[in-house]
Image (cartoon, rainbow, N blue to C red):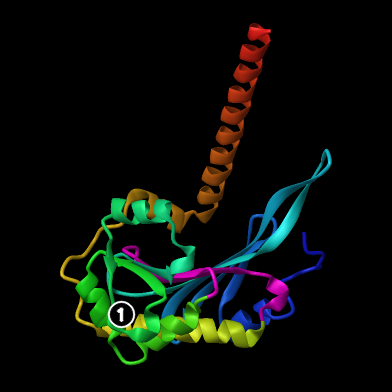
Amino acid sequence: MLQVQDPYAPEVDPFFRAAGLSARTFGLQSRIYEGRFHGRKVNATISPRTVTRYAGEIRHRRYIGHQFALALGVSCATRFVAAPAIAANGFSRRINRWVGLTQVHLNEPGLDYLEIWATEPDWARRWLAEPNAAQSLAALLPPDRRRNVSLAPVGELGFTLRTGIQYVQRSDLAGWMNHLFVLAEAADAAPPPLRRIKPRRIEMVVREKPWLSAIVVLLGLMALTVAITGVLFLAFLFVMWLL
């Protein structure tokens, strides 16, 4: 884990504090910032990510960056997700189709490296045709980075990325928030989607209690570990039976 007394103190805390947002602790090492940014409701959740690594029989946790999840309030209730095509795979595409999304093909040459999905592709095109919307989307999602921009029917426009917190400057945070604000303004300026989607129950639960999502992921990993252990044990018994 990154050995820093308080990784949020150098750049992150001062930026959000200057923007008028309040901070609270989430878990042991995560932080949530809440308030308003140019009049829009904002929620920013920032938390460290680690993976398990082995050195011989010694297991240790390796820091791989902080997850930044920034969200601004919007009035449109629809679904949309955009990310560089390098981050897409068959599983993510199946999930997108399962929640009712259709792949969007844009006429914007500067966004041809993105894979975009939406409940209403025509509305997504109208939204990104608003002044500066396409440019802000491109600025948030450079071709070589694994990031995403999403709209959820809970009334939030989100931007998610993972990076080492030691590399994040206040200018980076300002750029992300400003581009997200441009997209939020454009989403509310465009004619509204034809139908207003109701959020799924799990979306509301995760939004109101973000710590539950972490518990679900942890339980899923534990269940997977138990299942793998069980399969290996049965294979061992089978081999012993053959011998």
Residue 83 visible in the displayed image: yes
Work out whether 114 lies above or below 225: below
- Where, quadrant-wise, is the C terminus in this rendering? top right
Q: Which residue sits furthest front? A: 243
Image position of 104 with respect to 178: above or below: above
Q: Where is residue 26 in the image (x, y as percent from the top left)?
A: 62, 59
- Is residue 104 rendered to the left or right of residue 113? left
Residue 157 counted in the magenta span: yes
Q: Is residue 149 visible?
A: no
At x 69% / y 81%, what residue is drawn?
Answer: 11
Quarter residue 236 falls in: top right
Q: Against 183, is 90 above or below?
A: above
Per the image, label 1 sits on a secondary structure element best described as: helix
* Amino acid type of the residue that numbered disc 1 sits on in the rendered structure: Ala
In the rendered image, residue 100, in percent from the top left (x then y), is placed at: 26, 56
Residue 231 is left or right of residue 82, and the answer is right
Residue 7 percent location from the top left of the image: 74, 70
The front one of 145 and 203 is 145
Question: Which residue occupies 82% across, 64% down?
Answer: 3
Check if residue 113 falls in the magenta segment.
no
Magenta residues, start to end: 144-168
Front-most of residues 103 and 122: 103
Q: Which residue is drawn at 29% across and 88% down?
A: 130
Give the image quarter of residue 204. Answer: bottom left
Q: Compared to 81, does 207 lie above or below?
A: above
- Residue at 30% in and 50% down: 98
Instruction: Tell me the residue that label 1 is attached to.
Output: 187
Q: Which of 193 and 125 is in front in this view?
A: 125
Q: In this view, does 109 lie to the left or right of 228?
A: left
